[in-house]
C-alpha cells in the first residue's frame, strides 16, 4: 500500500482540506495559506521544509489521518454509522434572538455560551467572518457572548482554523473548540501527541458537514443577476441564518441587497465538492463530544421555518454538558433516536456506508492510502449488498480515472 511521503503529495492528490495545521507545525517553512481558483485555502511553503517538520505534518494532518473513537461497540447507544450516542435529540436555543440569527437552531452557540458562563472553559476557538473577505472565515478566540454571537451562522468557506493552534495553546488556558469534523480530527491528532493539547482542550463540538464547496455557486449567484463574482464585491455576505435556513444576502457597496433562497443558491448554481470531502470517513463529528446538524426531513429544507437542530452527545462529558445546558433552560430538547438521525441526514448515512468501497477504489487506482482507522467503516459497508459495494467502487474508480486524465 502506497503511503503519503510529502506535504506536496497531500495537496497534489487532493487530500488537503485547508485546516492550516501544517502552517502551525512547520514554522521554519513559513507556510502561507493561499486561496486556489476553487476558493479553497491551501498551504504554500515559502521556505524549504525541514524533514522533521514534514514528518510532523505527515503524522498529524487530518486530511490523511483520521483515527476514530471506536474502542468498543458495546458502548451506550452504539450505532455503526453514528458511533456512540449517549443521547440523541432535536432542539433549539431558548434565546429567541440567537435561535433566529444562528445557522439552524443555535444549539452550538448556546452550548458555547454555557461553557463560558459555567467557567468550564476560558474561551472557545471557532471560525468567525473574515473582516477582509466577505465570503471567508478565520479562526478566532471568543471569550464573551458577544464574540460568540459574531461566529454563529454557517460560512461555506475554508477557514484555516488550526493555523494558530500552537499560539492558542501557548495561552495556557482551558478552552473549547466548535468547528468542522475534520478540524476536530486535527485537534484529536494533536492531543494524541501533545500533553498540553490533552490538558487544555476541554470540550469539542462539531457540526455535521457536507463539504466546503467551490466558489462556483457564488459565481452562478452573481451571473444570474448579470454581475461578476470577481468584479462585483459585496461589503458583507451572509450565507444563511436570520431564519432557517434564512436567506443568502450580499450587501453591495452602493447599498443594493442581493438575496437568494438557500435552495436557489445550492440547487440552481453549479458547484463542486473537494475531493477529500468525497472520501470523508467522518463528516458527522464522531470524534467530538457533541455533534450538531440540521433537522430537515430527508436532509433538505422545505421553505423557511423556525430553526431546529438534530444532535447527539458522543461522550460522557458531552452528555453532562448537554444535560446541564438543558437544565439551565438555555436549550430546549426533545429526545429522539438513531432512526431520526437517519431520516434527517440520509446523505451522511449513505456516505458512511459507501466509504470503504470508495477508499478501496482509491487504493486500486494507486493513490497513496490515508490513515483512516477505528472508524467502523467495515461495519458501515456491511450494510450494503456486495453488488452495491462493487457499484460504488467502480463509480469511484471511473471518477478518479476521469480526474487523472483531465
Ligand atoms: C461547511 C459546512 C457544511 C455543513 N454541512 C452540513 C450538512 O451536511 N448537514 C447538516 O445537517 N449541517 C451541515 N452544516 C451545519 C449547519 O449548517 C449548522 O452549522 C449546524 O446545524 C449547527 O447549527 P447551529 O444553529 O447550532 O449553529 P450556530 O449556533 O449558528 O453556530 C455555528 C457554528 O459553526 C461554526 N462555523 C461556521 N462556519 C464555519 C466554517 N467555515 N468552518 C468551521 N466552523 C464554522 C461557527 O464557528 C459556530 O461554532 C454545515 C456547516 C458548515 C459550516
Ligand atoms: S494539515 Fe491541513 S492544511 Fe495542511 S496539508 Fe493537511 S489538511 Fe492541508
Ligand atoms: S466533508 Fe469532511 S473533509 Fe470535507 S470539510 Fe466536511 S468534515 Fe472536512
Image: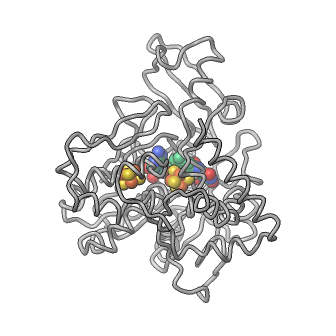
Vertical placement of residue 160 versus 350, above or below? above
- Name the residue located 53 percent from the left edge and 24 percent from the top edge: 250
- Return the residue nearer the eye: 32 or 331: 32
Q: Position of residue 24 (x, y in %)?
A: 26, 53
Q: Is residue 214 above or below residue 380?
A: above
Kindly indicate the quadrant of the structure image that contains residue 353: bottom right
Q: Name which residue lies at 63% across and 14% down.
A: 225
Q: Is residue 199 left or right of residue 138?
A: left
Q: Residue at x 58, y 78 (%)?
A: 84
For the C terminus, give its image quadrant: top right
Q: Residue 229, percent across and down?
A: 52, 20
Residue farthest along the bottom direction in this orientation = 74
Q: Residue 25 at x, y = what percent?
A: 25, 57
Q: Is residue 102 visible?
A: no
Front residue (pair 18, 125):
18
Query: Does the rendering let one see residue 166?
Result: yes
Q: Percent position (x, y) of residue 13?
A: 48, 49
Residue at 41 percent across and 51 percent down: it is: 9
Q: How many marks?
A: 0
Query: What color scheme is it?
Result: one colour
Amino acid at each position: 500500500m502506497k503511503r503519503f511521503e510529502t506535504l506536496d503529495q497531500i495537496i497534489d492528490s487532493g487530500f488537503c482540506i485547508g485546516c492550516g495545521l501544517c502552517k502551525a507545525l512547520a514554522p521554519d517553512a513559513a507556510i502561507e495559506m493561499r486561496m486556489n481558483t476553487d476558493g479553497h485555502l491551501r498551504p504554500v511553503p515559502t521556505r524549504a521544509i525541514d524533514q522533521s517538520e514534514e514528518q510532523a505534518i505527515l503524522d498529524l494532518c487530518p486530511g490523511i489521518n483520521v483515527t476514530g473513537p471506536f474502542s468498543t461497540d458495546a458502548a451506550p447507544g452504539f450505532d455503526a454509522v453514528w458511533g456512540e450516542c449517549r443521547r440523541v435529540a432535536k432542539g433549539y436555543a431558548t434565546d429567541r434572538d440567537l435561535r433566529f440569527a444562528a445557522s439552524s437552531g443555535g444549539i452550538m452557540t448556546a452550548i458555547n455560551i454555557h461553557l463560558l458562563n459555567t467557567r468550564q472553559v476560558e474561551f472557545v476557538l471557532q471560525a468567525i467572518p473574515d473582516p477582509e473577505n466577505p465570503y471567508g472565515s478565520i479562526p478566532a478566540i471568543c471569550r464573551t457572548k458577544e464574540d460568540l454571537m459574531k461566529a454563529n451562522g454557517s460560512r461555506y468557506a475554508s477557514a484555516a482554523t488550526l493555523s494558530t493552534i500552537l499560539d492558542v495553546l501557548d495561552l495556557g488556558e482551558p478552552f473549547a473548540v466548535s468547528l468542522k469534523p475534520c478540524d476536530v480530527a486535527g485537534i484529536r491528532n494533536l492531543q494524541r501527541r501533545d500533553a498540553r493539547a490533552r490538558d487544555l482542550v476541554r470540550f469539542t463540538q462539531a457540526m455535521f458537514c457536507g463539504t466546503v464547496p467551490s466558489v462556483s455557486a457564488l459565481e452562478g449567484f452573481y451571473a444570474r443577476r448579470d454581475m461578476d463574482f470577481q468584479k462585483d464585491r459585496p461589503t458583507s455576505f451572509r450565507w444563511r441564518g436570520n431564519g432557517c435556513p434564512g436567506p443568502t444576502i450580499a450587501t453591495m457597496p452602493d447599498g443594493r441587497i442581493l438575496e437568494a433562497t438557500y435552495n436557489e443558491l445550492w440547487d440552481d448554481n453549479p458547484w463542486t465538492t473537494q475531493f477529500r470531502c468525497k472520501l470523508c470517513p467522518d463528516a458527522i463529528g464522531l470524534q467530538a463530544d457533541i455533534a450538531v446538524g440540521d433537522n430537515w426531513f430527508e436532509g433538505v429544507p422545505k421553505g423557511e421555518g423556525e430553526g431546529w437542530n438534530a444532535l447527539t452527545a458522543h461522550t460522557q462529558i458531552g452528555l453532562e454538558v448537554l444535560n446541564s445546558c438543558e437544565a439551565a433552560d438555555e436549550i430546549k430538547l426533545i429526545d429522539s433516536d438513531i432512526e431520526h438521525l437517519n431520516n434527517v441526514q440520509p446523505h451522511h448515512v449513505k456516505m458512511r456506508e459507501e466509504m470503504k468501497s470508495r477508499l478501496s477504489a482509491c487504493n486500486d487506482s494507486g493513490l497513496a492510502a490515508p490513515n483512516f482507522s477505528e472508524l467502523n467503516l467495515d461495519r458501515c459497508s456491511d450494510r450494503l449488498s456486495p453488488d452495491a459495494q462493487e457499484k460504488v467502487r467502480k463509480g469511484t474508480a471511473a471518477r478518479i480515472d476521469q480526474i487523472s486524465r483531465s
